[in-house]
Image (tube, helix red, strand yellow):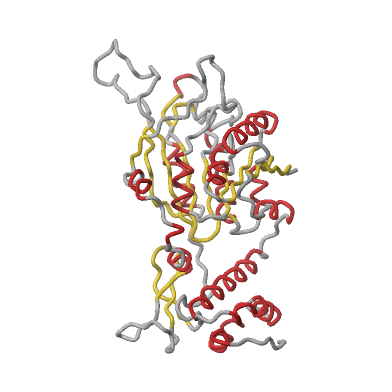
Amino acid sequence: MAKTKITNYFQKILEKSMKYLKETFSDDEINDLIHQCQHLNQLKKHDEIVSKWTEIYISNVKRKYQKEHEYDDDIASFVEHNQPEKVKVIWGDCLNVLKSLKSESVHLMVTSPPYYNAREYSHWDDLKKYLEDMRAIIKEAYRVLDNHRVFVWNVGDIFDNDNLFTKSTWGKRRIPLGAYFISIFEEEGFTFVDDYIWDKGEVQSQRHKNGNKPYPFYQYPMNCYEHILIFHKHRTDYTRYPCPVCGCLQVNGNAYSEIGHKSWECKNQECFERSEANRGKRFSVKSILTQSRQSNEFEIEEDFIKKWRRDVIKISPVIKINSKGENTLGHTAPFPEEIPEMAIKFFSYPGEIVMDPFGGSMTTPIVASKLNRNGVGVELNKNMFEDSIRKNITNKLGIDKMEEFEYE
């Protein structure tokens, strides 16, 4: 391996970590990694050196992992290009788009999927085929979503015919999509964490009212809520990661804090932080992600946290029909900005990539742009929604705020 000049505290990190580096990287990869750290020579404080070294190390581990799955360079570059002032729209089938992206390249996913046979553009022969299609997308989304990150899935239960037993009127029933999706997500590797109930307020429908039959067995509630489901991805990763205190890879595996969430304990006796019992720092990749950014610039407003403190939250549905009966948004199923705003503020940092696989009116990427994230939306029906999407982006962000990619 070629010699690379390294001075100051970083030399100590390398000396204690080299044998562990060789467990993960080839000689050429190690030399390249060290070359990327040349600028650390200019730093004087050990905590700055450790922070930058950890960042570079993690990015190299991820890059190596991403090589295990083929991806399309063009679309990957489009998604990853740092351009938060723009909304990135990908025209194409979201399953094919996801299959073409790098593994663990998106930091947050927020969406409301097309509901089973609820709109003219979302029809399936039966509920089974619908759920099979959704499962394929969720499975691929798991690969594309970064590790220890979050998928926010907004869905409501519906009243329809599942077409599994009969196609006649008596086959209509309440279909608990929320329950089905929780099972699918967990079967595909995600962990179910929370279910916010979106209280949509007073319902307008007269279905089930049965005002002329005030008797037992005729009374049913109207559905006035939707689920905002929160899922975590924790892919078990056995790669050693550097201690966030001393930066060394001289660490041992520690207990799991939850399924797939591996922890480590520093075994470097010269580490700057050891307990009274001489135990080293305990940490995980997730704790490095979260605890290293606990500064004023990333604080969430107190009032906003308070607004979402309870798991039942009242949000008025989007008003899309004006007094003339015109659809001002050009989309039949937009969801309110409050949902992606919560997801983006709670589960991402500025500059990161936020994706909506079912872009629709592009609410999620628009809000992401407003919050200085890289918003990406995928939409299949270009002919149906292109004009309304352009109009929506212009109205919310201004002209020339849309970048597009045509995926074959």
Front residue of this view, candidates 84 and 42: 42
Work out whether 24 lies above or below 187. below
Which quadrant holds residue 132? top right
Residue drawn at 70 percent across, 88 percent down: 3
* Residue 260 at least partly seen: no
Residue drawn at 56 percent across, 24 percent down: 328
Q: Is residue 34 left or right of residue 177?
A: right
Work out whether 33 lies above or below 294. below
Rendering coords of residue 124 (x, y %): 58, 31
Residue found farthest to the top = 212
Work out whether 219 lies above or below 92. above
Front residue of this view, candidates 382 and 401: 401
Front residue of this view, candidates 67 and 286: 286
Residue drawn at 44 percent across, 30 percent down: 317
Q: How many marks?
A: 0
Rendering coords of residue 259 (x, y %): 42, 63
In the rendered image, the quadrant that contains the C terminus is top right
In the rendered image, the quadrant that contains the N terminus is bottom right
Q: Is residue 174 left or right of residue 25?
A: left
Residue found farthest to the left = 215
Rendering coords of residue 395 (x, y %): 59, 32
* Residue 216 at least partly seen: yes
Rendering coords of residue 167 (x, y %): 52, 23
